[in-house]
Each structure stands twice: as structure tokens, then as C-alpha cells.
Image (cartoon, rainbow, N blue to C red):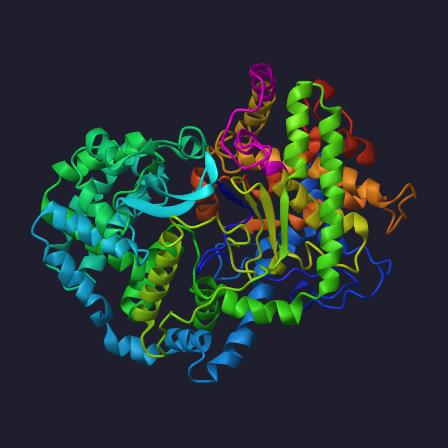
Amino acid sequence: MKIHWLMLYLLLGPACGAMTRANTTPAGVASDDTSKPWSGDSGLDWNGMDSRVAPGDDFYAHANGGWLRNTPIPADRSFHGVDQTLQELSIERTRLIIEEASKTRGSKPGDFYVSFVDEATIQARGLEPVKPWMKAIAGTATREALAIEMAKLARHDIGGLFVPDVGRDDKNPDVYVASLRQSGLGLPDRALYLEEDARLASIRTAYRAYLTKMLTLAGERDADERAAAVFAFETALAEAHWTRADARDAEKTYNRWSLADFEQKAPGFPWRDYFAALELPSQPAYIAQQPSAFAGEARVFASTALPVLKDYLMLRMLSSYARYLSRPFEETRFAFYGTTLAGTPEQQPRARRAVMLVSNFMGDAVGREYVARHFPPRARAQVEAMVQNVIAAMGDRLERLDWMAPETKARARAKLANVRVKIGHPNTWRDYTALEIEPDDLVGNVARANAFEYRRRVGQLGRPVDRDEWLSPVTAANAFAHMTANEIIFPAAILQPPYFDPNADPAVNHGGIGVTIGHELSHLFDDQGRKFDASGRLAEWWTPRDVERFTALTDKLVAQYDAYEPIPGQHIQGALTLGENLADLAGLAVAYDAYHRSLGGKPAPVIGGTTGEQRFFLGHAQSRRSKHREPALSARLLSDAHAPARERVWTVRNLDSWYAAYQVGPDQKLYLAPEDRVRIW
């Protein structure tokens, strides 16, 4: 199952802020009234611009320089921008729903919320809630027994060496299949273990200290020596891991293995015991996503002393659940992952984290009320019309391609015609009757909620594919492309200002949500999405010549992004970010065409001295605005498939229409000669 997400929506993750727009409602207090016609207000933040910067020198700074200068990153955030503004609005709306529910004992979302904000009970219990897991790990006498405990903990979202999952089979999308992918690292990416760099070395030192402190808090002896051994074990795992660029390749990661294949090709790990404990025994096949990594991880597992493996699994458990334990554990975890890795000085308020927790685990229970209050049918209808306009514009572009063979174009048109679009919310909501929630048992609630979702996924095996399934809560300010379903998904929370305002200038809406729609749609045709046919099947439907020409074009985009250096000495990884950069480029071009289609042949009005074309590009640049603390940006450059906001906006330099809108010439810094502009879709 290949899924793409536009913005990472983490359980306790990225953050919020406020972006105001001149002459409009503040972004955090958007109206739900979609009955009003466009009033003539553009929806742009005029005060957030910097007219001193020429568009052709730095279009990102031209559109956002005032905002960048005058907007601090909140102390409890590692970065700040429009994505966080969207999520903050969603969280605030969700908070009101959940806090109302918390006043009624027996409301599962309300009781879950209460269990997180009840600090007195959490403090009083200390380490007790996870002691049964610690005892089970300590009691293992063999590697086989430890692998069984690892599998049991995986059901509660406690990471071990691998991550099991169930999803559509890429080569047979009408059935579900179990899969396994590499895991096992406490640091976000293998590079943090392996690359020689002073800053990364300091992170490694801090991580070893973090492991030592966790063991000490858990009452373990010889913590420093044992932490060093666990770190050495993780480093050996990192050496076996695939790079993120390789791990995003749909063909490389599709490997059908039987249980016998795991035992023969990755010896040293008790696979039979592990899969049985995962409740996934004797499957006809499993998808082994990184086969050589499994072989390497199994080899390291077999050669590592059992006490080290036990310490490793205990630390994985403590690190996973520290945020739900007493204050010393929670603060120690945040000090490393929040402050050291991301540069964030302060924790987010506990009530806010509680809202995100409940939204993550019981998204449909909260989302149903969210949609009733904040996503009226008129808004859905308007977005549907824009989506169809963007799809039509994509179809026009397919017809004009000069590098694709006619027979491939015909198949591409069939794929486009077969795209499913999900807008706002699911047609049926998930039932949480079987999920047990107690108002005074936070760790138990989280463990049971994770197990509930795990059982739901495993229970899909052997059943018909649910084509109406949603992949995220509707309260997530996010958008998705699901390649094996050949569908794009737009939850209600992203369909709000500043991405989408039903009463704003169509040019700005097309630059915001229109580009997002085009972005997600084009993921179905990017360097990985293109490998899936009209039915969502991983199959080669391009001619070899098509692939050759396409690769020559994408290589130019990789080189363009490789040259960007957001932090001195640290460049963007063009290969890692290729899929997102392709989607940005195509989404922008398609949305621009869709905007002109929406005008119906009429000229766009001039507003504030700007043309419709200029407002389209400004709307896009302002919808991407964000700023990062340097540690967070550095970590992102190592592991995130998205380029930073500034360089994402700079993709305008590949569009002839941007040059025409701003009269950009060869004397300006972003100028590319026509032959150097990357044109694909």
C-alpha cells in the first residue's frame, strides 16, 4: 500500500501559530458561512509581504518577508507556519468538542481526555503502569522468547526491529496483504548514527545520555555501560538499513516472501515465533519491504548478547510510553526529542496534547461532530467543483505532452478518469464500541487503543477491500494520495483558511487549495505513482522510451534541488525529495490552468495593484510560509521527503507563466533560461 501525505500529522507533533490576513478574519477564527459571495477581498496577507525584495530575486521572501521578520516561533514549537495555523484551528475546534464530552462520565473521548490531563493520578502511579511489560521482558530466557515479547509489544505501537502492517497488495489491490518494514532505531534516521559530522556527533552523545537516564529512572544498575551497548546495537542496525531514498521506491520495496523465505534469506531471527505472536502466522505471502535490511538486522540480532537485546527492548518500550508516564520520564523524553533534536524550548500545554491524543486514537468519534459543526455541504460542493476543474486541467496537460507515447497517453487518460476523490469526511464512521477506555488509566487506554487499531488492520486479511476507508482523522489538516486505491483524499480540516476560503478571491484559493489538489493528484503520476495503473496495480504501463524521457526530466529536478543549501554545509537531498518536488511543480502548473478555466474567458480583476496571475502565485507562496529552528531544519534535511518552504516556493522559477506575471529577467537571482526550466506535466 503506497500512501503519500502532504504534511505530517503527529500525535504530539508539529505545532501551531497564528497567521492573520489583512482585511480578513484571522486564520484561527474562520467563519463557516459559505453562502456569502466573494466580497472582493483577496485573502492575501498584504502586510506579510516585503516589496523591497524583487519577486525574481527571492519570491518566497517577496511574498512572506514581513511575516518572517515579525513572527516569532512559539516557545513550545520547533517550527511555525501555515500548516500549523491550520492544525491549530482544528485542534481548538476539537478541544471544545472533547471538553464538552469530558463532562459526561462514560463518554469514551471524554474519559480518554480526562486520563491524560489527570496529572495527579499519573504522578502517583509512576512507573507502575509499564512494570508488567518490564517484567515480561526481563523474564525472557531466550532470543525466541524475546522476539515473542517484541511482537506482543508491537501491537501496542512499541517499536522493535520491524514494523508490521496490513494494507492493499500493490500488485493485487483488490486484496489485503501483511507487510513488514525496517525499523529499530531510536534516532530518526540512519544518517544520525553513521555520518561524520560535529553536530551529529553531539546528538549521538546526547542520545546515549538519554538512554542512560531512562535506565536510571527505571531503577536499573550500570546504566551508562548498558546504554552504550544498546547504542552500539542500534548503530549496527543502522548500517543494515536502507536509505530513505531507496525505501520510497515502489518496485524495490515490493518483495513477496513466504515464511520460509524469511527463514532462509534472513537467518538468525525466530521468524516463525515472531509472526505467530503478531497474529500473522502462515500467510500465503508477506511483503518484505527492505529485504537486505531484514537480513542485516537478523544477523545483528543473532550476534548480540541477550542482556543487551533485553535492555534494547525495554528502552524502546520506555521511550514509546514515556509521554504517558510520570513527569521525570515525560520531561526526559521531551528534553531529548523536543529540545535536543528539534530545538523546542518548552512542552506544549497538556490540554492541547490531550486533544491531539484523543483525535489520533478516536478520530471518527470526534470527527463526526467536527464535520457537523464546521464543514457545511456548501463547502464540500465548492471543493468538489474545484477538484473537477483541476482534474480537467490535468487532462488537458496530458494531451499536450510531447515526450509520452500515444498509447501511454491513452492509459494515462484512463487512470485520470478512474481517480476516486474523497472530500471532507467518510460516508460511514468507525465504531469504537469494543474499545475500553477508563478515565484513570492513561497507559492502559493508549495500549488498548493501539491494540484496537492493530486488531482492526489484521482483521482485514481475507476480507473484501473497503474502498470507503479513510486513512486519517478528518480533524487532520492534511491531504493524501493513495496510489493502490488511485484516489486523493482531503479531510475537512485542510479545507479552511488560509488554504481554502469559500469567500476569498478565486486566484488565491487556486494558489492555496488548488495547488494542494493538483499536488495530490500529480502524486498518482510522479516517479513512484506512475508505476501504478488505472486500477492501482503496481505494473509497468509506460514504454521504455517514456521512462527514459521522464527520468531525464526528473534528473534535472533532482540536480536543481541538490544545489540548494538551506543551512551552510547541508544541502537538500534531491533524490529523497523528488516525489514532493515533482508534485509541487505539477500541482502549481495544473492549478494555474484550472484558475484560468474557472474564469470562463473573463478577465481577472486587478486588486491592490496585482493581477489575477500575480495573486495566484502570491497565494501559493503565502500558503507555504513557515520557519524552523535550525536543529529542526537540519533534522528535516536528513529525513523529510519535503524540501523546506522557501525552496518549495522557488519551483515557480520553472513556470513560464510566473516569468510573464512578474516580468522576471536574466539579471535576477531566480531566473532560469528557458532551456533550463524543468517542464514535465
Residue 218 vs 459, above or below: the answer is: below
Q: Residue furthest right?
A: 602
Q: Is residue 619 visible?
A: no
Q: Locate the C terminus by quadrant.
A: top right
Residue 450 vs 228, above or below: the answer is: below
Observer-nearest of 111 and 425: 425
Q: Residue furthest left?
A: 141
Q: Quadrant of residue 350?
A: bottom left
Q: Quadrant of residue 267?
A: top left
Q: Residue furthest top?
A: 545
Is 520 displayed left or right of 265 in the figure? right
Image location (x, y in percent) of residue 598: 83, 45
Residue 531 is inside the magenta segment: yes
Q: Which residues are magenta?
A: 522-550
Image location (x, y in percent) of residue 283: 30, 42
Q: Is residue 314 visible?
A: yes
Is 241 displayed left or right of 610 in the figure? left
Residue 97 is inside the magenta segment: no
For the point 31% across and 38% down, which residue is it? 284
Q: Quadrant of residue 294?
A: top left
